[in-house]
Amino acid sequence: MAQQHTGVVAIYPGSFDPITNGHLDVIERGSRLFDRLIVSVLRNEAKAPLFTIEERIEMLRETVAPYANVEVDSFHGLLADYAMRREAGAILRGIRAISDYENELQMALMNRRLQPGLETVFLLAGETFSFISSRLVKEVISLGGNISGLVPPLVERRLRARLEP
Ligand code: PNS
C-alpha cells in the first residue's frame, strides 16, 4: 500500500532578541527537514527585551525571506496549545552545549506531557555557532566589541544603532 505523505509542520519558538547566525543555522537546516517551518516569537511581557516584538519579527522576516517554506509568527501562552492551533507536529530547538540540555529536556518533557503527539526535535548547533547567544552579542557590542559574522548584517546595523557606545 502506498504510504500517504502528510507535510510536517514544525515550530521554532524563541525570544529572538535579536536573531543570531546560530538561530539562522537552525532555521536553514530545519527548513530542509520539515515541509513548513514557523519561526515564532514569544510575546512575554515579563522579560525586558532590547527590541520590541514588532522589531524582532521584522528582522526575522527580512532574514528568512530567502526560505520559501519558512514563515514568521508570534505567540503567547502555552507553546503546546499554540502548536496545536497551528497544526504543527514538531517543535524545533537548537542545542549548543550540555548547559542548554537540562533546560531543553525539561521543556521538551513538559510539552510532551501537555501534548503527547507533539515531538521536540533538537539540532546540534554547528561548531562555528556554538558560543553565540543573543545575550552575549548584546553585551559585546554595548562594550565596543566586534560582532561581525555573529548576526545577520541587517541585525548588526540595528544593534549598532541601539547599543554601540
Ligand atoms: O529563546 P528562548 O528564550 O530560550 O525560548 C524559550 C521558549 C519561548 C521556547 C519558552 O520560554 C516557551 O516555550 N515559552 C512558552 C510558555 C510555555 O509553553 N511554557 C511551558 C512549556 S515548557
Image (tube, helix red, strand yellow):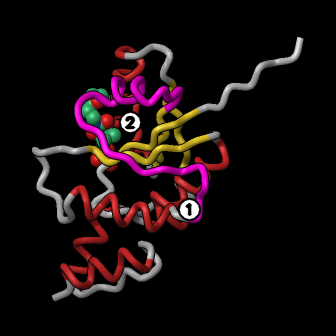
Determine which residue is flagged by label 2.
Answer: 104
Q: Is residue 19 left or right of residue 44?
A: right
Q: Measured along the vertical axis of the image, is residue 147 above or below residue 102?
A: below
Residue 127 numbered tag: 1
The local secondary structure at tag 1 comes to helix
Which of the 4 image quarters holds residue 16? Answer: bottom left
Q: Measured along the vertical axis of the image, is residue 120 above or below residue 16?
A: above
Q: Earlier in the sequence, mark 2 or mark 1?
A: 2
Return the residue nearer the eye: 144 or 10: 10
- Residue 81, percent from left and from top: 34, 23
Q: Measured along the vertical axis of the image, is residue 137 above or below residue 26?
A: below
Q: Measuring 37% from the left and 80% from the top, which residue is drawn there?
A: 147
- Residue 33, percent from left and from top: 65, 43
Q: Measuring 25% from the left and 71% from the top, which residue is drawn there?
A: 138
Q: Is residue 8 left or right of residue 42?
A: right
Residue 104 within the magenta-colored segment of the rendering? no
Task: In the displayed orientation, state which residue is furthest to the top.
Answer: 1
Give the residues drawn in magenta, as a range: 66-90
The residues bearing labels 2 and 1 have C-alpha atoms spaced at a distance of 19 Å
The amino acid at mark 2 is Glu
Residue 75 within the magenta-colored segment of the rendering? yes
User: Which quadrant of the figure shows ligand 1?
Assistant: top left
Quarter in which the C terminus is drawn: bottom left
- Residue 3, percent from left and from top: 82, 18
The local secondary structure at tag 2 comes to helix
> Is the residue marked 1 within 8 Å of ligand 1, measured from its CB?
no
For the residue carrying disc 1, how many other residues have a C-alpha within 10 Å: few (<14), some (14-19), or many (20+)?
few
Q: Measuring 40% from the left and 78% from the top, which residue is drawn there?
A: 154
Q: Are marks 2 and 1 in contact (CB under 8 Å)?
A: no
